[in-house]
Amino acid sequence: MNKIYFVRHAKPDFSVHDDLTRPLTDKGIIDSKNICEFLKEKSINKIYSSPYKRAIDTIKELAQNFNIKIEVVDDFRERKISNIWIEDFNKFSKSQWENFEYELNDGESLNEVQSRNIKALHKILNENSNQNMVIGTHGTALSTIINYYDKTFDYLSFTKIKDIMPFIVCMEFEKTNVLNIDYILEDSDSILSLN
């Protein structure tokens, strides 16, 4: 059995519009230290991440603590919305959750995001056994992974977590089949109910 802690990045600086290089805020940096404190007791064997700075920076201290190199997996990147900054994210997100094929010009649909994230996840699961792993990820990317295994996770569920940064979801797997999903708040061991 593999256990994966999906860590949604800490609070980013939204004044930086470049998705790849958007840094964490001061609060995000502090919260990433709390993530490290929470996960340092979990006997982590491997750490993977999206290539985005905010995802890597959220788990960087954890990797240093365990002396583990972060393996960057491009397919764990966040959904590309478009080449332009959108002002009404909630309206856009609702449209995507209502139709997994909906996308803007030069953007990705949730179906595309889910497909590449699940492909990358299955590769990791097939290459490992009896490991405790961390994946640094993003709100939408993680939500599509959850939805793949739990179809009750929908737009309403997404709205409950979209402003929680950082956020941990722990999934236990037998091969590529999920056995259990726990939603963990960033500041405690408490479990969050999304359904």
Image: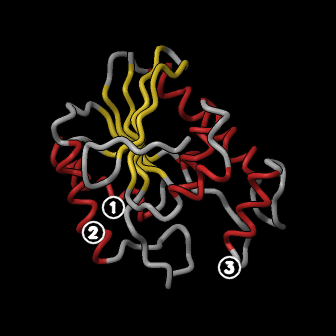
Residue 55 seen in the current view:
yes
Return the residue at label 1: 57
- Point 27% across, 69% down: residue: 29
Identified by mark 2, the residue type is: Ile
Instruction: Assess whether mark 1 and mark 2 are in contact (beta carbons under 8 angstroms).
Output: yes
Q: Earlier in the sequence, mark 2 or mark 1?
A: 2
Q: Closer to the camera, 88 or 49?
A: 88
> Where residue 4 sits: x, y (%)?
39, 32
Q: Residues within 10 Å of mark 1 (few under 14, many from 20)?
A: many
Instruction: Classify residue 80 by image quadrant.
Output: bottom right
Q: Amino acid at mark 3?
A: Trp
Q: Which mark is residue 29?
A: 2
Residue at coordinates 69% horizontally, 38% vertically from top-left? 115
Q: Residues within 10 Å of mark 3 (few under 14, many from 20)?
A: few
**x and y, in percent, of residue 167 in the image:** 39, 52
The tag on residue 24 is: none
